[in-house]
Image (cartoon, rainbow, N blue to C red):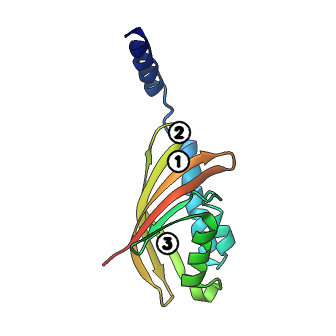
Amino acid sequence: MARILLGLALLMAAACNERTLSQGDRTAITAVLEQQRDAWNRGDLDAFMAGYERSDDLLFASGGKVQRGWQRTLDRYRARYGSQPGDMGALAFTEIEITDLGGSAALAVGRYTLTDTPKAGTGVFTLVFSRTPEGWRIIADHTSAAE
């Protein structure tokens, strides 16, 4: 019983000491999104993908499909949008809300709009960010088009 109480006390202490997102963290996460937008708009998929954690565990869900892996996600973007500035169109993000998930994780929810391409459209995204040695990176992306 003493071990259980000690364990609960430690869990409660850890929960109370969880770090909340600082303004610097929020700014860094927003900067990742801005860098992705800018990279997309100049047709630089490699720079766009720098916002994602380069891992086989990266989760990407869109169009009713779920896949894992940084390289598979890059390949999917290339197959769908090409990699030339004229092919990819213009990307904008709006209505971004960033929520602390405790310590080294955050959730970003927002709306995207893609114009100037046959693949134009709008929709919403939910991104899970993790604080990595390289900075804040997306570890899970769920994007869905508006109907």
Callouts 3 and 1 close, C-beta under 8 Å: no
In x, y percent, where is residue 145? 38, 75
Q: Which residue lies furthest to the left in this view?
A: 147
In x, y percent, where is residue 97? 41, 54
Callouts 1 and 2 close, C-beta under 8 Å: yes
| Disc 1 to disc 2, C-alpha distance | 6 Å
Q: In this view, does 106 lie above or below 96?
A: above
* Mark with earlier residue (2, 3): 2
| Disc 2 to disc 3, C-alpha distance | 25 Å
In x, y percent, where is residue 10? 46, 19
Residue shown at 61%/80% (left/top)? 78
**The C terminus is located in which quarter?**
bottom left
Q: Residues within 10 Å of mark 2 (few under 14, many from 20)?
A: few
Residue identifier under label 2: 22
Q: How crowded is mark 3: few (under 14 residues within 10 Å), some or many (20 or more)?
A: some
Q: Position of 42 compared to 142: left or right?
A: right
Residue identifier under label 3: 92
Q: How crowded is mark 1: few (under 14 residues within 10 Å), some or many (20 or more)?
A: some
The disc at residue 26 is 1
Q: Which amino acid does label 3 sit on?
A: Ala
Q: What residue type is labelled 1?
A: Arg
SS category of the residue bearing label 1? helix
Q: What residue type is labelled 2?
A: Ser
SS category of the residue bearing label 2? loop
